Amino acid sequence: MTTEGRSIGDQAMQAIASLRLTMFLLICLAVVSIIGTIIPQGTLPPEYVASIGGEQGNRYKLYSLLGFFNMYHAWWFQGLLTALALNLMACTIKRLPHVWRIATRPEFTLNSAQEQGATCRTELPLPEGTDREQLAKAVTAVIGRPTVTPQEEALHLFVQRRPWARLAVYVVHASVILIFIGAIIGNVFGFKGFVAIPEGATVNSFTDRSGKERPLGFELRCDQFTVSYYENPDGSGPSQMPREYKSILTLTENGTEVPGYKHARLIVNEPLTYKGIVFYQSSYGTTGSHRFTVGDTGMTVGAEESAHLPDGSIMHVLETVQDVSPFIAGKTGPAARIDIHPARGGETVTLLSFANHPEDNRRESARAGVPVITYLGGDERFYTGLQVNKDPGVWVVWIGCILMCVGLYVAFFMPHQRFWFRFSQGRLVIAAHTTKGQAGFRQQFDTLVERLQSSLGTEEK
């Protein structure tokens, strides 16, 4: 026992259930969430890594040590969430019994302590001969059916509105805990990954964020992929900016097509869901091989791959089209955009290579200082890049969010109101209390008193 007569357990409970601790934890979570917004999470863009000094730089090592690159899974962030959950549970355990007693076992008689703590109070003279039934009938008509408690010296009536509203704050506490539980379920039993499917190909697995290949449990075939482009502002045709890219997919299990999932459409912001796994349209690209001649030498290069030229330079294929006419006026046939990295260093040169325009090829190759490069075409095809997500805790999170909205609405806009009436020696004392909105409640109280006066046929003196 302490000198104050409280046990260590009581003191610990007092500290854990402290409102100050709640505010401190919420501020900490808000501050560190800003860090998670500013610093990229997950797979880092090479440009960002370079901007902080590379993987061998001190900033990179410090951020990595502190878990800033995967902050929402870092032990200290999980610790803050756990501390907040414990704080909310302790607050509930400490205060709920008292609030429950107020809501379920109210004081039916008006005493001096309640009069002093009342939000509003007034006193009315009643006409001679006013009896219990008349008073109860008037209160019922104006406010609600009262609980009548007769005593020797006075008659007491009590009415309350929305006593359950006092529990709303604990509904909010429970909703936060539910959201945490849903997030934990998603982290433990869910996954996120990626899969690329060439047109006409079928996959039955994907790669998760750790680089591990995981089975889907079914087969997914890309029947078709299409991409449309925005028009150039000058009306010269399609630009290079994609307007919409769309995948047509078919799901099969053991070689049998799944009903309702044949030629299913998948576009950005319209995901496809099957067995709790959600597929999002994430990216696209081309695959296959491309044929070139470099001088008099034939060469085959894979899509988005590199090849060494005879002079030692490196040619990297950026993108290709099999009909360039929609993009460049006056040009037809296949075309490729290529990066040339000079053998002896220097700036990278980007050039265009055409199948039907040798004069352009000579000019472009001379600018890059390499033999004439001619793009002959290729057997390329699109692939669709899909983000693969499974979050079994998402419905728990949604239930928590709905409960939070309901709890907050009730807590802020539906106060618990109590009305006491004490009738003695021809006078009626009215006291009322509300948990929220005292200023507005006083106006409401005055209106109720006026209606009660009218119903009883009396005037306030």
Image (tube, grey):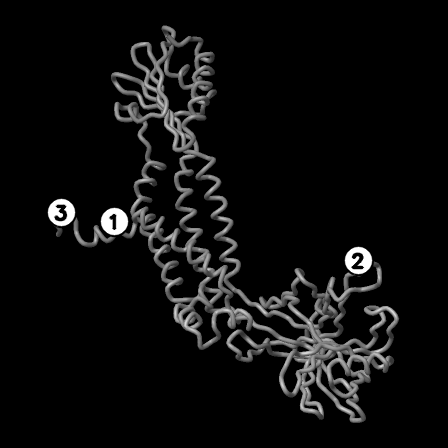
Query: Which residue type carries mark 2?
Result: Pro
Whether label 1 touches label 2, CB < 8 Å? no
Q: Tell me which residue sits at (37%, 55%) in the image.
A: 85
Q: Position of residue 456 (x, y in %)?
A: 43, 12
Q: Which residue is mark 2?
A: 233
From the viewer's perspective, tell me whether residue 243 is left or right of residue 173. Answer: right
Q: Position of residue 188 (x, y in %)?
A: 46, 69
Q: Above or below — where is 150 with respect to 456? A: below
Real-space CA distance between mark 3 and mark 2, rounded to the nearest whole angstrom = 80 Å
- Secondary structure found at label 2: loop
- Secondary structure found at label 3: loop
Q: Which residue is mark 1?
A: 14
Query: Which residue type carries mark 1?
Result: Gln
Real-space CA distance between mark 1 and mark 2, rounded to the nearest whole angstrom = 67 Å
Q: Above or below — where is 108 with respect to 390? A: above
Question: Could you classify mark 3 by the number of other residues whose Cα lies within 10 Å: few (under 14), some (14-19), or many (20 or more)?
Answer: few
Q: Which mark is residue 251?
A: none
Real-space CA distance between mark 1 and mark 3, rounded to the nearest whole angstrom = 14 Å
Q: Above or below — where is 458 with respect to 46? A: above
Q: Which mark is residue 5?
A: 3
Mark nearest the camera among 1 and 2 is: 2
